[in-house]
Image: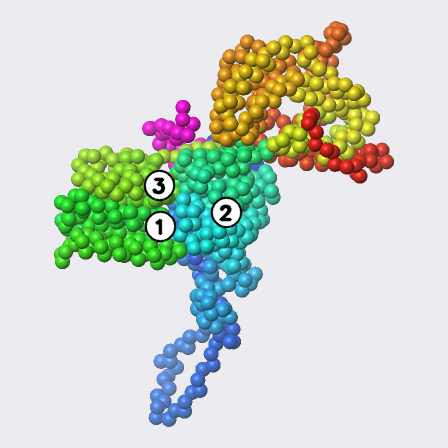
Amino acid sequence: MDSFAEPRRLADGAISLIDVRTQVTQLENDLRSKDVPLSGRIIQVCHYLPVIASFARRPTPSDIPSPPATPPAHASDIPPSPTAEQAPAVEQPVEPSSRWAFRSRYGHSAMVSGIDSLSETHDQVFVGWTGDIECATPSSADGESSDAPTNKIPASSVSEEDRAEFDNALRQYASRDENKSTKEMQHVPVWLDDKDAHGHYDGYCKQTLWPLFHYLLWQDVATEYASADSHWAPYSAVNAVFARRVAEIYQPGDLIWIHDYHLLLVPSLIRQTLPDASVGLFVHTPFPSSEVFRCLPRRNEILDGMLGANLICFQTYSYSRHFTSSCIRVCGYEVTSRGGIDVQGHVAAISYSPVGVDADRVAKDILRPGIQPKLEALRTLYEGKKIIVGRDKLDVVKGVVQKLRAFEKLLQDYPQWIGNVVLIQVTSPALSDSPKLERQVSELVAHINGEYGSLDFIPVHHYHQTIKKDEFYALLSVADLGVITPLRDGMNTTSMEFVISQERTKKSPLVLSEFMGISSNMTDAMQINPWNLSEVAAAMHRGLSMSEEEKLSRHQSLYKIRLGSSNMARQTPFMPKAHLESRYMQAKKRLFLFDYDGTLTPIVKVPSAAVPSKDTLLALETLTADPATSWLGMSAEHGGFIREPGQATWSNFTESLDMSWMADVLEIFKYYTERTTGSAIEVKKSAITWHYRSADPEWGLFQCHQCQDLLENNLARKRPIEVLVGKKNLEVRPLAINKGEITPANTRVTLEPPLSVTLLAKDKEAFTPVELAIERDAIFTTAVGHSSKRTLAVWHVTTPEEVVEHMLHLVRDVIPEDARPALADAPEPEPSSSHL
């Protein structure tokens, strides 16, 4: 089976928003019944607030010019004074209730609509940058440099008092929208230094990340190297400000959602401050393949920042697959059986869920009274002609040039449409101007009109402007064909708005680029490769000639909306130092059982480099010196060998076992080693391991699964062995050898003699079951990794360094300093060829 194929979706898998809310309510009730704290709030972290703010500054004396001297007047020039009743009231300057004014910010309508829809059931907090503050009374004498825009106010000049007034004014502005929402929507501004804000957005976001994510690779930027990394500092600084702002308002139980590529470092920064917070990241743009993404100089920092989230969500399955591949190939991380990314025990779940539009809002918008007159005017203007409509931003990735060339190809290959079809193309200005692209589009429009037009017929009507909502929906409603041809796009909402607008009119078909995130969900649109001009022209011809029955059938399919779902792992609480110390002091006997790699030392690529630190040796030696510590020995090869304190030799538990199976396993491992470049075999005394850390990550993982399947379904059924999947390795060992055999799992247990012990015993009758006098809360089963790591352990610590820190805590607080071994000045241990 192709592991890269997109998972199938059920044909009848449509889920209504009401069903989703019902499931959310049930989940919340289940969590409350388990005493899981829920605040009921969702913190939405976005780059911008959904408003544009303007500020009327108090004029300073230098801002107010001195009036000219009043010229002397003759008495005859002065009219007689009116009576008191006739005198108009003199207008005195009145201090406004607020000098802040707001208006809606357009853009990201799908995201904002989705956030608004959650306000029916949840209190929400919208965290975002204030944006540039506009001056309500622009003045050139504002102290700014000559090249600074005079209608902007520096954020640094806004006082704390004015910022507090901003919060109050914004709260009043938001409260005016009393529609269907019954829950609170709080807006929390993030104030940024202007230089950092624009270095972040205009610099790193727009010059580095946006081109990369759209497969442009900065080829349109003159200074490629500088543009790829020169704005990293402001990008990092702004992400840190956002993370601090979220931490300030966070309450236990809040759900944090971070949106888009502007804030990719925020998940990890929040994780460091709020390790138990539930964090989601939704990437609204495409995510490129690993071969493209690895060109980014800060690739590791970006991926590690994103992987701080519990859930990372993309628009399509292919984008999520690209991200997973980048994590494997660039960072060397592993994929769990459920498809998540394992980062030092913290598992980040990966999912995809296409964003849609607020269909109810769009359906209401197309009923606006101003739309019908404009629609009738368009019908009259183009009477007798088919209308093709396109509406895009004038960005290089939107495919406007390709669309125009394909339209020319339509008129060339199907001359019957000359004089009978027009293309109305609206290109709204992009965030960054591209004079070269504007000139190219204008020249192409002039060429087509000159070649195929006449005195009474103009084939292409190009409008480079932002059109109003009434005009936009009138244009979508009157169209005989919609054509949307981006070269790369995350989620194009115009395609969905086109379908909804056509519900009340012609049910016209849609030509859609296959390189859009929405294309996989709109399979009944005519999907094309925008680079193949003949294919696009043929699709246009088919759409214009389509029968009414086929139009209706395609439209009805496109009108359906689908939703997805996700899940979360349970959270393991952090190891309580005070409780550990208390039980340690009460205990008359103590037993410590430590793993080595990943517990006492970090996991490293070369096993011989996994040596204990000075602090680790100090903690182990000191705890061993405590008379109350009943046993602290060493085991090797998963418990196959044991060396007790004071002994110079190792006890081999495998001596009496049949180890002939190792030859069969070795032959299988050799087969896969020959076919997996970079893999190697490690033969131990009691086990045999196949490593693929140096192989291609995805091919190595695939071969590992194939080898595991072969071993488990053939050899392991006939022999007393077990197959274990480790970190970039596959190991086979005897079933009788297990370092966890002697670990108690219940409150009060009867411990049977471990099989690995009785294998060496000459007098097996000497080992009888022993009842352990131990209480459950005196057993500290601990996982090393993040709290979301799937484990049966009761507690967790994040890193091996914290394991050592907990041991040193007991050393400092329990054992007198004069009774501790002197290791502070000991040299660092040398790497050796073997490890515990």
Amino acid type at image mark 3: Met
Q: Is residue 355 visible?
A: yes
How far apart, in angstroms, are the residues tagged by discs 1 and 3?
14 Å
At a point 54% along the width and 34% down the height, the residue shown is 332
Does the CB distance between marks 2 and 1 fall below 8 Å?
Answer: no
At a point 29% along the width and 50% down the height, the residue shown is 401
Query: Which sits earlier in the primary sequence, circle 1 or circle 3?
Result: 1
Q: Which residue is mark 1?
A: 396
736 vs 64, left or right, is right
Amino acid type at image mark 2: Leu
Seen from the viewer's position, the closer of residues 247 and 450 is: 450
At a point 47% along the width and 31% down the height, the residue shown is 26
How far apart, in angstroms, are the residues tagged by discs 3 and 2?
23 Å
Q: Quadrant of the image for the C terminus? A: top right
Q: Position of residue 190 (x, y in %)?
A: 52, 53
Q: Which residue is mark 2?
A: 263
Q: Quadrant of residue 790?
A: top right
Q: Position of residue 217 (x, y in %)?
A: 43, 47
Q: Secondary structure at mark 3?
A: loop
Q: Secondary structure at mark 1?
A: helix
Q: Quadrant of residue 745?
A: top right
Q: Secondary structure at mark 2?
A: helix
Q: Position of residue 59 (x, y in %)?
A: 49, 72
Seen from the viewer's position, the closer of residues 66 and 459 is: 459
